[in-house]
Image (cartoon, helix red, strand yellow):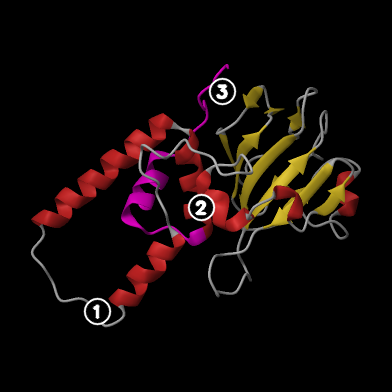
Amino acid sequence: MTSSPLPQHHLPEEVLLDHAAGSLSEGMALLVATHLALCPGCRAAATEFDALGGALLAAITPQALAPEAFEQVLARIDADELLPAAEAAATAAHGLPLPLNDYVGSAVESLPWRRLLRGIETAELKPRGARSSEGFPVSLMRLAPSTAVPRHTHQGLEITMVLQGGYSDAGLHYERGDVQISDASVDHRPVVADESSCLCLVYQDAPLRLTGPIGRWFNGFLRF
């Protein structure tokens, strides 16, 4: 059985530092934990950052905590989960990395998939626990083989990570575990490989804006 190639496109080091510090939102923490489950290199770096943070804490003179500190710690534990290195590459029954298990459930097909365009579907994920799903900027996107995403730019930050299959964009190819970061400076048109469909985890804090000669006319009607 041939092993999958290791990811070639990674999260920035500062994001891994924020993850170690526990300062990421739940949605971003989920994306980081999922990438770490598939990327041994970033997982090793994150472990080093965790160890460095522990050493720094040990050297600091203890200070009195704010009254709300305990509740904040509980919220971070619920929102951010880093798997032990020995378990990081394991997958759940649906074949996705374990950090997604509580968000996806037992079957990907049972998610509320919504068709955006021919060959493009999306399913919004919800935060864990009883908290409201409003504003949770993480979703799964499923694209059929040979599908070209309409040319677009971004009104905010978008981070796309491949879970299955792959796609090409601006001369680069993205496969399982690879991360692509896009913002308002990026105007692009990702294209899925011919052989198989592509499933991605997407963090998107603002809608896309279509920029093609035809697509720009649909900005008022389509929401990506």
Residue 117 x/y as whole percent: 87, 47
The total number of labels drawn is: 3
- Counting other residues with Cα less than 10 Å from the Cα at mark 1, is it few (<14), some (14-19), or many (20 or more)? few
Q: Residue 97, how many percent across, how many down?
A: 54, 42
For mark 2, give the secondary structure. helix
Identify residue for label 2: 30
Res 184 seen here:
no
At x 53% / y 57%, what residue is drawn?
27
CB atoms of marks 3 and 2 within 8 Å: no
Question: In the rendered structure, which disc, 1 or 2, sits on the residue that comes first in sequence?
Answer: 2
Helix, strand or loop for disc 1: loop
User: Would you say residue 13 sits in the magenta stretch?
Assistant: yes
Three-letter residue code for mark 1: Ala
Secondary structure under tag 3 reads loop
> Which of the two marks, 1 or 2, is nearer to us in this view?
2
Q: Which residue matches tag 1? A: 66
Q: Which residues are magenta?
A: 1-26
For the residue pair 198 and 15, the one nearer the viewer reads as 198
Report the side of 212 relative to 15 (left or right).
right
Left or right placement of residue 12 versus residue 174 in this view: left
Q: Nearer the viewer, residue 69 or 83?
A: 83
Dot in front, 3 or 2: 3
The N terminus: image quadrant: top right
Which residue is at the front of the view, 19 or 184? 19
Marks 3 and 2, how far apart in space?
A: 22 Å
Please name the residue shown 13% across and 72% down the image. Answer: 63
On the image, the x and y values in percent for residue 172 come to: 63, 24
